[in-house]
């Protein structure tokens, strides 16, 4: 895949997509047990339109159930396990994390996608790139780190460091590119003010953000750029189970382009599953054309997007342009320090802990970052309320890789519900 520039010929792009789709489908028959059942004999020699009309959607719950039934990695594997060299997992957004394996070849295809992201942000071999993330098992910026290595950048890992230590490393090493979430870019600037650090000393020229909506929102982008003098914000989005999906439009800072050489993209009405009307918002659906070892076909990402009505884009690209980037999720979700936290996932963790009669989740802003706190009401069988709270805190940490405080309420203090429960409460501050 050419990582130097976006394609400018739509017909040629679609020919490339069709060739790659046919190669993918041929590789899945009969090797991949998961899709062997789902595709039900769908031939690899049809058109793109035929594939989108006949191939079924893939839903996250199917993948979770498949990994539960065929643990630990599920049946969505095209090759013997010996072919796979990379392991990652999601943050458990539906209560249980999904494990994801990649072959060396598939991993390289993901790196090529990230090189497209870097190219759009004008990042090259002369840059010093700081990665302000934990280097945990989720895909995160792992692909970005290795792609930057291949570009010849000086790569500076920031895992296991406090915000103060990260700021010192950014300033002292004369970092030119910062990779983090939009929220954390603002948090670092806030810490700099608290510590009396002069941001005018910063050499950061480029801030690449991902992990949550905001990088394509004008107000958020402007606020970050004001806090980081001389820097420009570039948005990006991806998913562990899909890979790096989009890059910032060089001509319009509030637009993301899907890397359609690597992904067959659709926008559908989330209720009907039919194609959304031209220029109307809908849910992004993706087929991974280059991730053969652990593919996803017509995957319902849950990302709410608004495709641009005009193509080609003013930048010259004919790839799908998303106005405003990722607008949000089709389901209810809160992003806490770059981690997607779903009410259903929290509910499963709380219920699995036992001895909880009722609970409430408070969503609030603290130091410019979204946080959550859980309040539990122990049931009558609980003999150690504080011990229960500590146990639930540990379960939440294991599920989301976040510290979520848990406190207790007296018996009968929390509301009960006859209809749909409203346990998630937003507050201005905590």
Image (tube, rainbow, N blue to C red):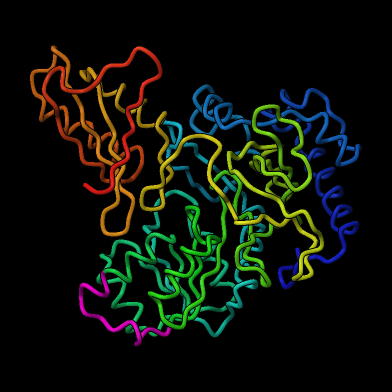
The part of the image, by quadrant, that contains residue 234 is bottom right
Location of residue 56 by image quarter? top right
Of all residues, the one furthest to the bottom in this rendering is 201
Residue pictured at 42% horizontal, 67% vertical: 131
Image quadrant assignment for residue 150: bottom right
Q: Is residue 122 magenta?
A: no
Task: Please give left or right for residue 246 compared with residue 407 in the image.
Answer: right
Which secondary structure type mostly characterizes the magenta part of the structure?
helix
Location of the N terminus (image quadrant):
bottom right
| The one of 371 and 291 positioned closer to us in this rendering | 371
Position of 233 relative to 352 (above/below): below
Seen at 76% across and 69% down, the residue is 314
Q: Position of residue 415 (x, y in %)?
A: 24, 21
Going by the image, does 128 lie left or right of 36?
Answer: left
Q: Based on the picture, tell me whether residue 202 belongs to the magenta stretch.
A: yes
Residue at 64 percent of width and 60 percent of height: 256
Work out whether residue 302 or residue 48 is closer to the camera in this orientation and state it: 302
Tell me residue 304's x, y (percent): 60, 43
Q: Position of residue 195 (x, y in %)?
A: 20, 75
Which residue is found at the position 68% from the left and 59% from the top? 257
Q: What is the number of callouts on the image?
A: 0
| Side of 44 where 362 appears, left or right | left
Where residue 400 appears, as percent x and y from the top left, is 36, 41
Image: magenta residue range: 191-203
Of 255 and 257, nearer the camera is: 255
């Amino acid at each position: 895949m050419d990582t130097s520039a976006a394609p400018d010929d739509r017909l040629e792009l679609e020919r490339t997509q069709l060739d790659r789709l046919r190669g993918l489908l041929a590789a899945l028959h009969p090797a991949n047990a998961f899709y062997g059942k789902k595709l039900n004999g769908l031939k690899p020699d049809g058109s793109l339109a035929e594939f989108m009309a006949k191939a079924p959607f893939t839903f996250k719950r199917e993948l979770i159930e498949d990994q539960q039934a065929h643990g630990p990695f599920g049946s969505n594997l095209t090759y013997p396990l010996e072919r796979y060299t990379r392991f990652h997992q999601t943050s458990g957004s539906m209560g249980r994390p999904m494990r994801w394996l990649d072959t060396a070849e598939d991993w390289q295809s993901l790196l090529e996608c990230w090189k497209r992201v870097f190219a759009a942000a004008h990042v090259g071999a002369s840059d010093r790139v700081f990665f302000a993330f934990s280097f945990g098992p989720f895909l995160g910026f792992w692909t970005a780190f290795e792609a930057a290595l291949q570009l010849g950048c000086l790569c500076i890992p920031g895992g296991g460091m406090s915000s103060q230590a990260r700021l010192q490393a950014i300033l002292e090493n004369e970092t030119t590119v910062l990779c983090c979430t939009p929220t954390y870019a603002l948090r670092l600037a806030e810490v700099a003010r608290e510590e009396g650090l002069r941001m005018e000393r910063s050499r950061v020229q480029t801030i690449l953000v991902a992990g949550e909506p905001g990088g394509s929102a004008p107000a958020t982008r402007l606020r970050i750029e004001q806090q980081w003098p001389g820097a420009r914000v570039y948005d990006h989005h991806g998913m562990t189970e899909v890979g790096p999906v989009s890059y910032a439009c060089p001509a319009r800072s509030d637009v993301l382009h899907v890397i359609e050489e690597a992904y067959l993209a659709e926008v559908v009405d989330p209720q009907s599953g039919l194609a959304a009307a031209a220029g109307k918002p809908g849910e992004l659906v993706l087929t991974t054309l280059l991730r053969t070892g652990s593919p996803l076909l017509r995957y319902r990402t849950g990302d709410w997007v608004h495709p641009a009505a005009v193509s080609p884009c003013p930048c010259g690209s004919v790839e799908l342009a998303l106005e405003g980037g990722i607008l949000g999720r089709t389901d209810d979700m809160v992003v806490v320090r770059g981690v997607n936290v779903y009410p259903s996932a929290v509910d499963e963790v709380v219920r699995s802990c036992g001895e909880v009669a009722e609970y409430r989740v408070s969503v609030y802003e603290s130091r410019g970052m979204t946080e959550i706190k859980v309040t539990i009401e122990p049931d009558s069988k609980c003999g150690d309320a504080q011990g229960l709270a500590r146990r639930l805190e540990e379960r939440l940490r294991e599920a989301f890789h976040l510290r979520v405080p848990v406190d207790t309420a007296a018996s009968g203090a929390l509301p009960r519900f006859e209809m749909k429960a409203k346990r998630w409460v937003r507050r201005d501050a905590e």
